[in-house]
Amino acid sequence: MANLEMPHGPLSFDETEVGKVEENNLGNYALGFIRSSDSAFIPRYVGRSDSDLQKELKAKLSTKSQTRTHFMFSYAGAKKQRSIRSARTTTTSRNSWKMKFIQQDQTERTARVP
């Protein structure tokens, strides 16, 4: 099985454990269960929060089921790092430059650079 690279968890998917997640942090999470035969975490849902990971997980508590008894998560890093993945400069015409910012959600924002 592939590594989810989520250092926190698996934790019990309940109000107490979700409440320990830091507020106002962006991040990724996986909901799943612990397989009894080998105690492996089996993900059933993978998501991300672009605003508040704790709030997102609390909203998902209503979907708790036999296959969503545990969760894992990772914080996404500094706020600017989360919203802008990379930047590249391209030449669009003679003496005209464009800086493209590629965001996590694959949308692009363009800024003219003199």
Image: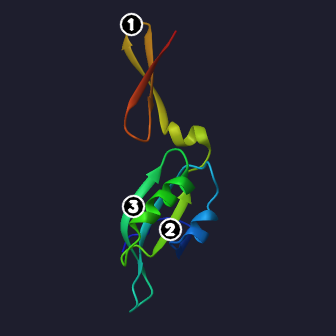
Q: Residues within 10 Å of mark 2 (few under 14, many from 20)?
A: many
Q: For residue 20, which quarter of the picture?
A: bottom right
N-terminal-most mark, 2 or 3: 3
Q: Is residue 66 above or below residue 72?
A: below
Using the numbered discs, state the Cα–Cα distance from disc 1 to disc 2 in whole angstroms: 50 Å
Quick one: quadrant of the N terminus?
A: bottom left
Q: Residues within 10 Å of mark 3 (few under 14, many from 20)?
A: some
Residue at coordinates 38% horizontally, 74% vertically from top-left? Answer: 65
Please tell me the numbered disc located at residue 46. Answer: 3
Residue type, mark 3 in image? Val
Front disc: 3 or 1: 3
Residue type, mark 2 in image? Met
Q: Residue 9 in the image: state x and y as whole percent.
A: 55, 72
Q: Name the residue nearer the viewer: 110 or 16.
A: 16
Residue at coordinates 49% horizontally, 54% vertically from top-left? Answer: 56
Residue at coordinates 62% horizontally, 64% vertically from top-left? Answer: 19
